[in-house]
Image (tube, rainbow, N blue to C red):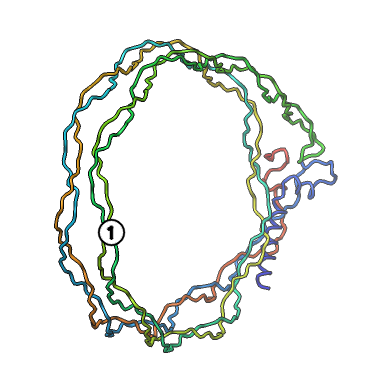
Amino acid sequence: MQRLKWVMSALAVALTATASYAGDCGACRSACAPAPCSTCCAPCQTACPAPCVQQVQRTVLVPEMVTETRTVTVVEYQQQQQERQVTVCKPVWEDVSREVTVMVPHQEERTGTRTVCKPVTREETRTYTVMVPHQEERTGTRTVCKPVTREETRTYTVMVPHQEERTGTRTVCDTVQEQVEQTYTVMVPHEEQRTGTRTICETVQEQVEQAYTVMVPATETRTGTRTVYDQVQEQCSRTVCVDRGSWVCETVCDPCNPCCPRTVRKWCPNVVQEQVPYTVTKCVPREESFEYNVTVCHPEQRTQTITVCKQVPRQEEYTYTVTVCAPEQRTNMVTVCKQVPREEQYTYNVTVCKPEERTCTVQVCEMVQEEETYTYCETVCKPEERTCTVQVCEMVQEEVPYTYCETVCKPETRTVTERVCKMVQEQQTVTCTVCVPVEVQREVNVCVCRMVEKTVTCEVACAPACAPAPACHSCGKPSCDDCDD
């Protein structure tokens, strides 16, 4: 109810101010003019003063955040040292000697002849066409929009928040500890002797005649066709929208004096379409023949004798040790924490918003069209013949002797010593760290919203009283002709 009184008081002040400043001519016509067509040039006898406003103190509730300290129960984990017996495998290394056959490479120097192509460079003059751009300045007309600002009164709705206290139910979980027997599987390693068969390859040398192909290069002159583009200018036209409107004088009624008409100048638009010519440069393709040199390689069959090493396999039995892990079931007791839910009542504050109508004055911008002349530059390309010198490379064949090294492998028997690892089981005592849950009381800071009373000063409108005034207008001038527009 108190908030409704404040809204009604503010509405009364706004209506009084609107009636007082609604317009000088309207107030003068309603107070002084005896007929609709009478002028407001006669002075008024009385005038109403500005509305009276007085200041009143009110008490309102303001939300305020308060920090409180509360005690809660939390679960923490503490570390404890425990000893366990585990079986570990330790490696034991032994030296074992055995004979192996290896292929020992050595280098042999040989001489041969090969055909190489050497590049020979010569200069050649060629003619090409380029498009040289240049700037041309032109003039055109365009329509631009200029902004015009006016004031407009609008009504909008705002949401005013206020606090409400509500009660709800929430679920709280309590932690309960329980001892559970857990079964786990351990892989216990042990060694086994096994026998297997492996394949050993012996190296045997053999003379083989091999055929190979050599690509012999040769230069050929061929004739081809390529596409050349010529630049051609063409005249085109496009459609442009132009405003051919004009200013027109129109007679309207004066808002301050409806009996006195006045002449207003108004723009009447007339948008028409016109054809504007412009020049376009197009590329016209044409076919042109030219000659070029191509290096072509022809295959040639040749033979040579090489030494080839072949691997002859044979089967051999051997004994090896394998570590095999066998699964074993074991049990231990572990502590498990479970969450037990329970219902709890609590009170919380909710902010609820209510709609409220308000009025404001905004600036509205309108765009007005206007013709404008501007100058722009256009780039036009013209063809131009130019000459350049290019380097042409030709390949010339030549026989060149060369020496190369070939790697030949010979078998050789050697004795090698290898380290073999065996795994030996051993019992050890291991100390490990285990985390045990413990309940601890802790104090935490919680932010709570509370409503606090606060005294504020607001303005309330009082009843206005009329008194004689020297003039009938709020602008203070004796006639409507002296008022500004």
Residue 58 % position (x, y): 59, 72
What is the crowding at mark 1: few (fewer than 14 residues within 10 Å), some, or many (at least 20)? few
Q: Secondary structure at mark 1?
A: strand
Compared with 423, 153 (above or below) is: above
Q: Is residue 86 left or right of residue 451?
A: left
**Quadrant occupied by the C terminus:** top right
Give the residue displayed 16% in from the left and 36% down from the top: 108
Q: Quadrant of residue 83?
A: bottom left
Q: Which residue is mark 1?
A: 315
Q: Name the amino acid type tagged 1.
A: Gln
Compared with 288, 253 (above or below) is: below
Q: Name the foreground residue: 347 vs 192.
A: 192
Give the residue displayed 56% in from the left and 78% down from the top: 348
Residue 62 % position (x, y): 55, 72
Give the residue displayed 18% in from the left and 45% down from the top: 410
Residue 401 % position (x, y): 20, 24
Q: Evaluate whether residue 246 shows in this view.
A: no
Q: Quadrant of residue 459?
A: bottom right
**Quadrant occupied by the N terminus:** bottom right
Compared with 132, 421 (above or below) is: below
Q: Evaluate whether residue 146 shows in this view.
A: yes
